[in-house]
Amino acid sequence: MRKNCRGAATVLTALILVISAYGAVRKPKSLQIYFIDVEGGQATLLVTPSKQSVLIDTGWAGSRDAERIAGAAQAAELKRIDYVLITHYHQDHVGGVADLQQRIPIGTFVDHGSDVEDSDNARALYKNYEKAIEHTKRVHLMPGEGLPLPGITFEVIAAAGERITEPLPGAGEANFNCASESEAEPDPSENAQSIGVLVSYGKFRFLDLGDLTKKKELELVCPNNLIGIVSLYLMTHHGIAADNPKALVWALRPEVAISNNGGHKGGDPEAWQMVHDSPGLVALWQLHYAAAAGKNHNAADNFIANVDENSEGHYVKVDAEADGNFSVNNSRITFSQKYRSH
């Protein structure tokens, strides 16, 4: 009898171990997004549930931003970055390419094609970019195209001055805020050429429009919203007032917004208030305290990665699940908040 009991116990223990192992294997993995502090530029690192990676922009030239990006990659346990997507050719977005290449291997560079600006500085910056990547694979993406990332959908919705022309699934509603928008002037700069991407993981949707300017933004949502609603919105153009119009932000209805402003760049009070008041917004996070905006137009300290004049390069990290749940974490302190997308 005792022998049979021991045998049954052994079988039961083995069964529990098998069930536990199966549960560990089946546990869903998250989409990770690191909003890296490059002090008024952009460097956003995405790590997919299958551990593929996309870096959107590389910040400024020099060791500071390259080391901060490499540090985030190390935190994500990456040995290389599969794709580096350059939204447009301004120095706060493309300047750090050569410095980053010295610190971590890069698989493929993605951009919108040639630079449209023709100043001496623009030509020099673009020439430096082409030289830096001459031995690395390079592809151009246009609206409607994307990247082959298993488990998520990575869609280009704007690039090279063009945009999607048909609503994405579930989108297409009339946008009644368009009528109150003032007419936007055409922008001949690289900002209007920015690659804008929508990243979807199940019910979670993240929108990054780079430095796209107002006319191009409104074309995406007026007279009908071609994008739909999003879970997470990176404020366009570092939170500059002119390029976060009400007709865009209020149509997107983000649950959470993040401003990648610097201490003295972006983070305009008007844009902050517009986003803060948008329907459905639960929280607005910032990479920096915006010195000129004052306390009434900055988030509480817990929601700001860098609160001091001299930044230490703290980042904001998002962990998103396919069911729409996501958390936002402040690397400066032990503080995180959980949210659920619409």
Image: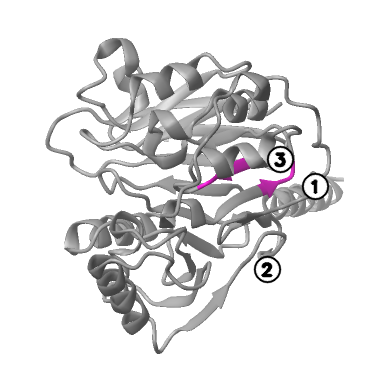
Residue at (26% x, 76% y) in the render: 102
Q: Which of 219 and 203 is in front in this view?
A: 219
**Residue extending farthest bottom:** 135
The residue positioned 22% from the left and 27% from the top of the image is 307
Q: Image point 39% across, 33% down: which residue?
A: 239
* Residue type (three-letter) at the residue carrying disc 2: Pro
Mark before the other along the chain sequence, 3 or 1:
1
Around disc 1, counting alpha carbons within 10 Å, would you say few (fewer than 14), some (14 to 19), or many (20 or more)?
few
Splitting the image into 4 quarters, where does residue 248 fall? top right
Q: Give the range drawn in magenta.
A: 200-209
- Most common SS among magenta residues: strand
In primary-sequence order, the first of circles 1 and 2 is 1
Q: Of circles 3 and 2, which is in front?
A: 3
Q: How crowded is mark 3: few (under 14 residues within 10 Å), some or many (20 or more)?
A: many
Mark 1–mark 2 distance (CA, rounded to whole Å): 43 Å
Q: What element carries label 3?
A: loop
Is residue 93 depicted above or below 268 in this figure?
below
* Residue position for label 2: 148
Q: Are marks 3 and 1 in contact (CB under 8 Å)?
A: no
Residue identified by numbered label 1: 12
